[in-house]
Each structure stands twice: as C-alpha cells, then as structure tokens.
Image (spheres, rainbow, N blue to C red):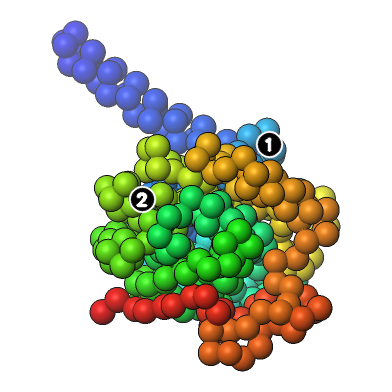
Amino acid sequence: MNMKKFLAILVALIMVFSFAACGDEETDTFADADLRVGYIFIGPINDGGFTQSMYEGAVASKEHFAGAMDFKYRENVTEDTQEVKNTGLSLIDEGCNVIIACSYGFGDAMKELSEEYSDVTFLHFSGSMKNDTNFDNWFGSMEQARYLTGMAAASVSESNILGYVAAHPYTEVQIGINAFTLGAQAVNPDVEVKVVYIGTWGDAEKEKNGAEELLNEGADVITYHADSTAAQLAAAEKDAWAIGWNFPKNDAGDKYLTAAYWNPEVYFNYVLQNILDGKFAPESYYGTMADGLIAIDKLNDAVPADVQQKIADTKAKMEAGEFEVFTGPINYKDGSVLCEEGKTLDRAGIWSINSEIDGVSASSTN
C-alpha cells in the first residue's frame, strides 16, 4: 500500500470515529440526565412571542437543574392531532420521559399518548384535560398582567380607543380582553376597547392587518393575543403605542409601552422537581403573579407617575391576594351579568367567560 493511499484510509477512519464519538457523547449526555424532556412548540423558537417564551423557559430550566435535566424540542408543529401525536412518539423514541406540549390544540394528542405510555409524564399548556396519574394541564392568571397593561394603555391614550388583535373568540382570549378592559376602565371609565378576531393563533400577516384595521378606526394603543410581534410593528409604523404579549420583546422602539408575559421556567422548575422527587400528581396547575409565572414588563416613562404608582400598588395587592380582577359589578356587553356587585369570580367562574364585557366592541376579519 502506497503512502498516499494509507493516509487517505487513515483520515477516513479518523472521521468515522470522530462522528461516532460525537453521536455517542450526545446520546450519553441525554441518557445521563434523570429527566429527558421533549418540548412540542407550535411556532419557531425565535418568534419573539409565545414559542420563544416557552423555549427560553426550557433553557433556563435546564440551567436550573444543572445536568439533572436535558431536553429536545420540535418547533413549527401544527395543531393537527396526528401530527402532534407523531411528534410526541418521535421524542419518546429518542428517550424522552416527559413531554411538554405548548399549545391549546395539542391536548387531544397528549391525552391519547398518556393512555398508551404510562411511564411517560405528559404536560399540556392550557386546556383542561388531565388524568389521575401521568397527564396534567397548566396555565396561569394572565388576567392579572392584562389588567395592569390596560391601566397603562388608558393612561397614554388620547383617542380613548384601544385596539386589541385577538386570535379566536375563545374563553382564554376573552378573559384577557375583559381583564385588559377592566384595567383600562379603572384609569379612564370612558375608554373603548375595539377587538378584531383574526381566526388564528399565529399568522404575522393577519396579525398586522388586524392591527392596521384597528389603527384606521382610531385606536392609538395596540395590544394583541397572537403569537408574533407583528401588531407591534403595525403600531410603530403609525406612531401608536404598542403593548407586547407572551414575551418581553420590544419591536416598537420608543412606542413600546410594556408587555404582559410568561416566565414558564417557574412552572417547569416546579413540576420537574416534583417528578424528580417522585411527588408528581396531576393538579391542573395555575400560576400567578405571586409565584412569578405571570409578569409585566417595565413601564415606558410616558405612563404618568401617578398611574405608575397605582399600577405598582395594584400589582402588590394582587401578589398579596388582596385584589381580584373579576370583582363585580361586571356586565357583558349585551347587558347580562357576568359578576354581581360584591361578588368575585373564582377560577371556575373566570373560565366560564364566554363573551366580551361592556366597553368592548368586537368584529372578525374575513
């Protein structure tokens, strides 16, 4: 064998063993972790909104557990039950013993998988499905942060019209709309909240178009319940104020007012520690501003000092359990009673909300 041929074979063997070592190292690293979590995301991990919030929470949680937890993920998974189920199966095949599905429409697939894989724990963001052993749902009192952002919005509005781009006329979304409206009314009783439903959780073009429609109708503050920051961009282009959602990302420059957002690592750390300790039990976890799952970003200095103080005081009362957003009297926009005077809605009552309150007008895009 000549020297050139020998060297070529030697280089090839080195490359083969190098790739094999890398593969073994990655597998061993994942296997060494007691918890091997598979995350299923509806959007891209850099969307500046919901999926990025969940992804960065996963990264923070991995750092928290310092080697005891590792994770894999799939992004851009549509809310199709079979696609979600196949995605979960692939993660389980790769060694995941916990699956965290981060979208409402992933629930049916998680339920089916939980019945087939009793040794895997399944955790579903939003929704209400769970069992008694290995399947739970989690969410939080986002109405708290929405209320506070409504206060901020009303304090800077000159037109008294606030715009709200919303995904679907569904309870989760309507809770946020109504809480935002109540917060705004606490600062300015004459404020109007205009909502446009775009019929999707995540479509940047529809989100921006919805925001532009509201701006054309006189709104000078825009917020949203959708996955990207497109509504912020639309507001900034019209020199209107923007309030973020899901993740504290400013895409509106000087016109960014604040944001209502999630700290999902609070839940991830809590539930994964319970699994590690053998203490996990489905409980339908509901985080709050007090435990840190729910948060509001720093306020723009344009919010008047007295309103900033009122927001801070209200936030402190929320954290102390001394202030509940849905305290009567509150009426739906058709005049029917949502919450009677002197009463406060409990969690079940809040999740029975099925329309918008007085002070809100809503329409849908075609």
> Toward the viewer: 187 or 224?
187
Tag nearer the camera, 2 or 1: 2
* Residue 324 shows in this picture: yes
Q: Which mark is residue 240?
A: 2
Residue 325: image quadrant is: bottom right
Residue 98: image quadrant is: bottom right
Q: Which mark is residue 64?
A: 1
Residue 35 position (above or below residue 176): above
Q: Is residue 122 left or right of residue 53?
A: right
Type of amino acid under label 2: Ala
* Residue 290 shows in this picture: no
Type of amino acid under label 1: His
How many numbered discs, if any? Answer: 2
> Toward the viewer: 188 or 120?
188
Q: Is residue 238 left or right of residue 20?
A: left
Q: Residue 344: horizontal and vertical position, in percent?
A: 77, 75
What residue is at 40 percent from the left and 43 percent from the top? 255
> Toward the viewer: 342 or 63?
342
Q: Secondary structure at mark 1?
A: helix
Residue 347 position (above or below residue 354): above
